[in-house]
Image (cartoon, rainbow, N blue to C red):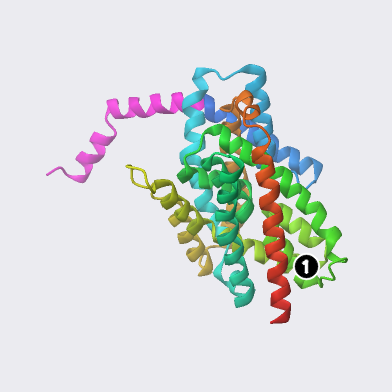
Amino acid sequence: MRSAPGVLAAALSRPAVTAAADRLRSLAPGLAAACAIALASVMLRKATGIAALNPVVLALVIGIGVRTAMGAPAALKPGLAFAVRPLLRAAIVLLGLGVTLGQLLGLGPGALVLAVIVVAATLPFTVWLGGRLGVERSLARLIGAGTAICGASAIVAANQVAQGRDEDVSYALAVITLCGTAAMLVCPALAEPLGLEARTYGLWAGASVHEVVQAVGAAAAGGPEAAQSGTVMKLARVFLLAPAVAALGLLAGRGDKARAPVPWFALGFLGLVALGSTGLVPGPLVEASRALVPLLLATAVAALGLSTDLRALRARGGAPLLLGAASSLFIALLGLAGVALLEVI
């Protein structure tokens, strides 16, 4: 049996080191291109100070623009593929540090049940309606995940098990961005006509609006109390990312000969939620993860944009956009009915 130094020496042998170096060289061009776009997106968001400018969406737009103008050199492909899979999954796992069980429990049982109902009803409704509208099932699942859970992050996470094409993810991101932006503008305008108090309005915005930044922005329009309740409600939906992705994995594998993919990254997400909830993770580390996650997500989505052929998006027509609008209306009405019931209870 080899000693520990012998095993280490074998691992560090010249062929192993050469193979690792070759692997890094093959990944470097694509990763560098995607990371440059991601950094530009984050810097643009900070420079403008516009919270609604999601770096993930900006990275997608820039990536598609670069791909359309310059094509897709073969040298970029290994690095882009790495960014869209392992790097993305690492970002999703780190996302778990931003959600704690204490925050969720502070909402109260009624609001937590509402978060579960909103996600559990919106996702299958969107898939069902997508079938009636002629939208491919993989694309309908992605639009449903983005609407029900947390926009871009949910879409790229769900595609790890929904197994859609790159064009599916790009189209779903575009649809969710448009619908979420519309919701962010419409919800504050409806608060007074609907007679919603600050906390109730915040819960509605958190239960209905797609992206985290969009939901928080919409809730903040109702004042500090609305911002707090809306933020935590939105975090409750983010917390449901892991079980929702696991359920999508089972649906994707149903009827197929291949086994449903196991979303290990979703389990990692839940593990970090549990770890963060213990209070043992230093505050600066949590803040660092919150800064790193948008950059990692933007890098992965920039790689996706660089891999996306715009002609394939045009071929999809308007049915997915109609599906996104209908799904957004469904979750808004369901959320409104839920907060109204909470007021009565």
Which image quarter: residue 336?
bottom right
Q: Which span is picked out in magenta?
A: 1-28
Name the residue: 40% across, 27% down: 23
Q: In the rendered view, does 46 fall on the left or right side of 4?
A: right
Q: Is residue 21 magenta?
A: yes
Image position, residue 122 (x, y; %): 60, 57
Identified at 22% across, 40% down, the residue is: 7
Q: Give the class, few, some or many, for how many residues have Cα within 10 Å of label 1's Cα (few <14, many ≥20).
A: many
For the question of whether residue 35 can be seen, the reply is yes
- In which quadrant of the rendered view does residue 148 lie? bottom right
Image x and y of residue 343, in percent: 73, 78
Whole-percent x, y for residue 332 in the image: 71, 59
SS label for mark 1: helix
- Looking at the picture, does residue 83 appear above or below residue 264? above
> Seen in the image, is 79 located left or right of residue 53?
left
Rendered location of residue 220, percent (x, y): 79, 61
- Report the amino acid beneath label 1: Tyr
Q: Is residue 174 above or below residue 246?
A: above
Outermost left residue: 1
Mark 1, residue position: 201
Residue drawn where x is 22% and y is 42% of the image: 5
In the rendered view of the protein, which quadrant contains the N terminus?
top left
Q: Nearer the viewer, residue 296 or 262?
A: 262
- Looking at this view, is 203 or 92 the one in front? 203
User: Front-most of 216 and 131?
Assistant: 131
